[in-house]
Image: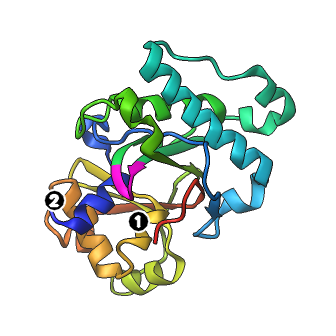
Amino acid sequence: MDRVQLKVVAAVVLLAAGCPSCKRERAGGSGDLATDSGYVSPVAADFQVGPEEKTALLRLARNSVETFVRTGTNPPVPEELAKRWPHLNAPRACFVTLRVHGELRGCIGSLEPRRPLLEDIRSNAVSAAVHDTRFHPVSAGELGEIDYEISILDVPRPLQGVPVAELPAWLGQHKPGLIIEYRGRRSTFLPSVWEDLPEPLAFLEHLCRKQGSPADCWRDPSTRMSVYGSIKIAEKERG
């Protein structure tokens, strides 16, 4: 697997296979807090997260992982978080990503909201640390080296009205998260993958190959696509 693939795989979910490689990541801790909300979407319009909330969510992810790795138990979500910020307890989907020195260490997430955001972050963070089958479980000795990133997603919606010939240009302009469904297979890249694959054709081809389909599967008239936005919260901005 080349370097680009290693970076990109952090945000990939192969849903047809039950999403075994999409995992969660840790959050919180020291270091600069880097945030952005890339693709302009309903997330930015109807769901806002302030600086204190971002710090609290990252801390929740980090504390959840560190508690599980050290004790083997899943810590509960602190009740004071939902009391202070009730909207954080509303159903929202997220991905949590773990990195060590900039390299992927685990990534798991949800594409559709099925539980409160606080619980989704806690659960995905622990899973990214110990259940991402691409990596061995995080050890106690690694905890101080891990940086966390959380992507809070809006609900995917069908991509309509964009001709195939114009799709690369449209994607390059808007840079959304993208789901491709082709012949029973489904895969996605988060909006943050545009940081590693800024060229739309490469973005599309990698996403097709990640589900085991031909690189040009996105051109097939039967292919269905959906897009979504995200709010990204990270302990450190990638260079």
Quadrant of the rendered structure where residue 194 is?
A: bottom left
Quadrant of the rendered structure where residue 193 is?
A: bottom left
Q: Is residue 53 above or below residue 215?
A: above
Q: What stretch is highlighted in magenta?
A: 99-104
Q: Return the mark for residue 23.
A: none
**Mark 2–mark 1 CB contact (< 8 Å):** no
Secondary structure of the residue carrying tag 1 is helix
Q: Which residue lies furthest to the right in this view?
A: 84
Within 10 Å of the Cα at label 1, are there few (<14), some (14-19), or many (20+) other Cα atoms? Answer: many
**Residue that carries the numbered disc 2 in the rendered image:** 213
Tell me if I can see residue 187 in this picture. yes
Q: Does the magenta stretch include residue 102?
A: yes
Q: Return the mark for residue 193.
A: 1
Q: How far apart are marks 2 and 1 (CA)?
A: 19 Å
Residue type at the position of mark 2: Ser
What predominant SS class does the magenta segment belong to? strand
Within 10 Å of the Cα at label 2, are there few (<14), some (14-19), or many (20+) other Cα atoms? Answer: some
Secondary structure of the residue carrying tag 2 is loop
Q: How many labels does the image show?
A: 2
- Name the residue rendered at 39%, 79% in the picture: 198
Q: What x and y, as percent, mark residue 146? A: 44, 44
- Name the residue rendered at 27%, 41% in the picture: 16
Residue type at the position of mark 1: Val
